[in-house]
Image (spheres, coloured by chain):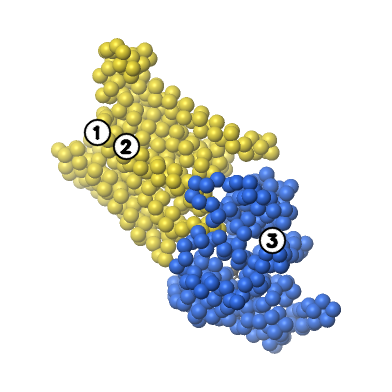
C-alpha cells in the first residue's frame, strides 16, 4: 500500500499518465483516419497532410475520416469534462451529463425533429442543443432553494428525465413507422458526421474546456466540502452554478451532434480518477485525453468490427462501458 | 474594542426559527466558548458569524463593515472556520494543509517558500510531522481532526471559529487542541470562537462564555459569572455543583441528573 502510495504521490508520475493518455489519443486518431470501409496506408495519410503528392485517398481523408475523427475527439473530450465537473459539483460519483437532464432534453427535442419534421434534418443539431440547455437550466431552477443542494439536483434531474422520457416513448408509439430513422440519434453515432458538425461543436469545446481549466482551483476547493471551501473564500454557489453551466454547454453541444451517447461522461472521469486521483490539475487533462482517445477508438472499432455494417459508437461504448462499470463496482472503487 | 458585532440576527430553516433576535459583541484577542444543548443553534450561530450563512434578518459587522458585503476572499484572509463535520479526503495531510494558503494567493499564483514555512509551522503545532505524507483518508478520527485544524492554522486568521474541535479526540489531544488555541490567542492575538460540549473545558479555557438556549442568548460573561447552578438547571436541565480552585482560579463543575 505504502509503496503504491509513494508512487501515487509523485507529481511526475501523474504527469506521465497524462502524457500516456495524450499518446493514446494520438494513436487512436491515426487508427481512426486509417481504418474504415477502405484501409488507407499511413504513407498516403502523411502525404495528404504534408500536401507533397496527390493521393487517391485525399478525398476520403479530408472530407470523411478527418472531420469524423475530429468530431469523435471533441465529443469524447466534451462529455468527459462535463462528467468530471459534475461529479465534483454534485459530490456524487454517479453524476454524469445526463443526470442534469441534458440527455432527456436533447432526446425529446431531437425526436420531435426526427419524427415530426424529418424533412428538416439540418435543424436537428440546434434544436437538440436548445432542448438540452433548457431542460438543464429547468432542473437547476427546480432544485434551487436558498442555494443548491446536490441531492436535490439529482432528484429533480431524475424526475424531469422520467417525465420527458415518457414523451419520447409516446412519440415512438404514435409514429412507430418512423422510429427506424431515429436509432442512430438515440444510441449515439458518428456516421456521416463531417465538417458542419465540427463547426457546431468546436466553439463550445474551446470555450468550455478553457473555462474548465480556469475553474481547476475552484473545483479543488469544492472538494474540501462546502464549509471549508467557503471558509477559504470560495463563492460556492457561484462555482456550482458556473461550472454546471460549463458542463451543460459541453454536454449539450456533444449530444446535439452525436445523439444520446451514454457512459463516456461517467466511465471516463471515473477511470481517470482511479488512476490519477482527485486533483483537478491532473484529473482534468487526464479526462480530456482519455475521453477523446476512448471515443475515437470505440468509433474506429465500430466501423471495422462487422464491416460493412457500422456499429454505432454508442453501442460499442455501452458494450465496453457497462461491464467496466460493474468491474469498478465489484472492486468497490466507486 | 469590539471586532465582530451581531445586531438582532434571526434565522430560520424552512419555518423553524433557529436563531431569534441575537445581539452579540466579540472583542479582539479573546477566547469565547459557545455552549448550549443539542439543537439550540450553536453551529448556526457560528456559521452566521463566520460568513457561511447569511441570516434572514439582522447584520454582522466585522470592524464596522457589513460582513456579508465584504468580498469573500478578503474575509477569508481574516476569518477561518473549522466545521463540525468534514469529509474524508483523498489527499495527503500536507496537501490538505496547503489549501489553507488559498485566500492569500491570487488565482494562478503558486505557493512560495514563505507559504511552506507557514505550512510547516501548522504541521508542527498540531504534531503531524510523522503523518505529513500520509493520505488523510487513512488517518484516525483524531489525527484527521488535527489535520483539519492545521488547515485553519495555515490560513493565519485573525478570528478562528471552531465547531466542536475536540470531538473524536482522546483527552490528551483534546487538551493539545485547547492549548494550541490558547497559544494562538496569547502569541498572535487571534480571537477564538468555539463551540464546546465539555463544560469543564469551557470553564477553564475561555475568557467569556456565550450560553445559547433555544436560539436565544441566555447569557454572556466570564465563566465565573455564567457557570452557576441556575444556568445549568435552566439550560442543560442538570444539577451542578461548582467548586472554585482558589490556587489556579479555576472552576470545576460536577454535574448530576436533576431529581424532581
Ligand atoms: N441546513 C439545515 N436545514 C434545516 N434545519 C437545520 C439546518 N441546520 C440546522 N438545522 C436545525 O436548526 C437547529 C439548530 O441546529 P444547530 O446545528 O445550530 O444546533 P447545535 O446547537 O449546533 O446542535 P449540536 O450540539 O447538536 O451540534 C436544529 O434543530 C437543526 O435541526
Ligand atoms: Mg453543532
Query: Residue beneath label 3, please?
Result: B168
Residue B236 visible in rendering: yes
Residue B163 visible in rendering: no
Tags 2 and 3 on a common chain = no
| Residues packed near mark 2 inside 10 Å, few (<14), some (14 to 19) or many (20 plus) | some
| Residues packed near mark 1 inside 10 Å, few (<14), some (14 to 19) or many (20 plus) | few
Residue A264 in picture, x, y percent from top left: 41, 38
Residue A300 in picture, x, y percent from top left: 37, 25
Residue B241's image quarter?
bottom right
Residue B182 in picture, x, y percent from top left: 71, 67
Q: Colour of chain B?
A: blue
As drawn, A49 above or below A262 = above
- Closest to the camera, between mark 3 and mark 1, is 1
The disc at residue A196 is: 1
Query: Residue beneath label 2, please?
Result: A202
Q: Colour of chain A?
A: yellow
Amino acid at each position: 500500500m505504502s509503496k503504491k502510495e509513494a508512487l501515487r504521490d509523485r507529481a511526475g508520475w501523474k504527469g506521465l499518465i497524462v502524457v500516456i493518455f495524450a499518446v493514446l489519443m494520438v494513436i487512436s486518431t491515426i487508427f481512426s483516419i486509417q481504418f474504415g470501409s477502405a484501409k488507407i496506408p499511413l504513407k498516403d495519410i502523411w502525404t495528404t497532410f504534408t500536401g507533397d503528392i496527390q493521393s487517391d485517398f485525399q478525398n476520403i481523408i479530408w472530407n470523411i475520416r478527418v472531420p469524423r475523427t475530429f468530431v469523435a475527439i471533441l465529443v469524447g473530450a466534451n462529455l468527459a469534462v462535463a462528467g468530471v465537473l459534475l461529479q465534483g459539483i454534485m459530490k456524487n460519483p454517479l453524476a454524469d451529463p445526463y443526470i442534469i437532464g441534458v440527455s432527456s432534453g436533447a432526446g425529446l427535442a431531437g425526436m420531435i425533429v426526427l419524427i415530426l419534421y424529418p424533412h428538416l434534418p439540418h435543424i436537428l443539431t440546434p434544436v437538440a442543443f436548445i432542448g438540452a440547455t433548457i431542460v438543464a437550466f429547468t432542473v437547476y431552477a427546480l432544485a434551487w432553494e436558498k442555494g443548491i443542494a446536490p441531492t436535490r439536483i439529482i432528484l429533480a434531474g431524475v424526475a424531469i428525465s422520467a417525465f420527458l422520457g415518457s414523451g419520447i416513448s409516446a412519440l415512438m408509439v404514435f409514429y412507430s413507422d418512423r422510429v427506424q430513422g431515429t436509432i442512430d440519434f438515440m444510441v449515439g453515432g458518428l456516421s456521416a458526421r463531417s465538417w458542419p458538425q465540427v463547426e457546431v461543436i468546436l466553439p463550445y469545446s474551446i470555450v468550455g474546456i478553457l473555462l474548465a481549466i480556469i475553474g481547476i482551483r475552484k473545483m479543488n476547493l469544492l472538494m474540501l466540502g462546502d464549509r471549508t471551501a467557503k471558509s477559504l473564500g470560495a463563492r460556492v454557489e457561484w462555482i456550482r452554478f458556473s461550472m454546471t453551466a460549463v458542463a451543460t454547454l459541453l454536454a449539450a453541444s456533444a449530444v446535439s451532434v452525436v445523439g444520446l451517447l451514454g457512459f463516456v461522461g461517467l466511465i471516463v472521469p471515473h477511470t481517470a480518477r482511479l488512476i490519477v486521483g482527485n486533483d483537478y490539475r491532473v484529473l482534468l487533462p487526464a479526462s480530456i485525453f482519455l475521453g477523446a482517445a476512448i471515443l475515437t477508438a470505440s468509433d474506429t472499432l465500430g466501423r471495422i468490427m462487422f464491416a460493412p455494417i457500422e456499429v454505432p459508437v454508442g453501442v460499442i461504448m455501452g458494450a465496453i462501458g457497462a461491464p467496466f462499470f460493474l468491474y469498478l463496482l465489484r472492486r468497490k472503487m466507486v | 474594542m469590539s471586532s465582530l458585532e451581531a445586531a438582532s440576527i434571526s434565522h430560520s430553516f424552512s419555518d423553524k426559527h433557529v436563531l431569534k433576535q441575537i445581539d452579540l459583541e466579540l472583542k479582539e484577542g479573546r477566547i469565547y466558548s459557545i455552549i448550549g444543548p443539542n439543537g439550540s443553534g450553536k453551529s448556526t450561530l457560528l456559521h452566521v458569524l463566520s460568513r457561511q450563512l447569511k441570516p434572514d434578518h439582522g447584520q454582522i459587522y466585522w470592524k464596522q463593515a457589513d460582513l456579508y458585503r465584504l468580498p469573500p476572499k478578503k474575509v477569508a484572509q481574516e476569518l477561518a472556520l473549522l466545521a463540525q463535520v468534514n469529509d474524508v479526503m483523498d489527499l495527503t495531510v500536507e496537501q490538505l494543509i496547503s489549501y489553507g494558503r488559498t485566500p492569500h494567493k491570487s488565482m494562478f499564483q503558486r505557493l512560495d517558500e514563505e507559504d511552506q514555512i507557514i505550512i510547516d509551522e501548522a504541521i508542527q503545532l498540531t504534531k503531524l510531522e510523522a503523518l505529513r505524507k500520509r493520505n488523510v483518508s487513512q488517518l484516525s478520527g483524531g489525527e484527521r481532526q488535527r489535520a483539519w485544524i492545521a488547515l485553519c492554522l495555515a490560513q493565519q486568521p485573525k478570528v478562528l471559529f471552531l465547531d466542536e474541535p475536540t470531538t473524536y479526540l482522546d483527552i490528551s489531544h483534546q487538551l493539545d487542541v485547547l492549548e494550541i488555541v490558547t497559544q494562538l490567542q496569547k502569541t498572535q492575538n487571534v480571537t477564538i470562537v468555539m463551540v464546546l460540549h465539555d463544560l469543564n473545558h469551557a470553564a477553564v479555557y475561555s475568557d467569556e462564555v456565550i450560553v445559547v438556549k433555544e436560539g436565544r442568548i441566555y447569557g454572556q460573561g466570564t465563566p465565573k459569572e455564567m457557570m452557576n447552578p441556575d444556568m445549568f438547571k435552566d439550560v442543560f436541565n442538570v444539577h451542578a455543583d461548582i467548586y472554585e480552585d482558589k490556587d489556579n482560579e479555576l472552576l470545576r463543575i460536577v454535574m448530576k441528573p436533576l431529581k424532581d
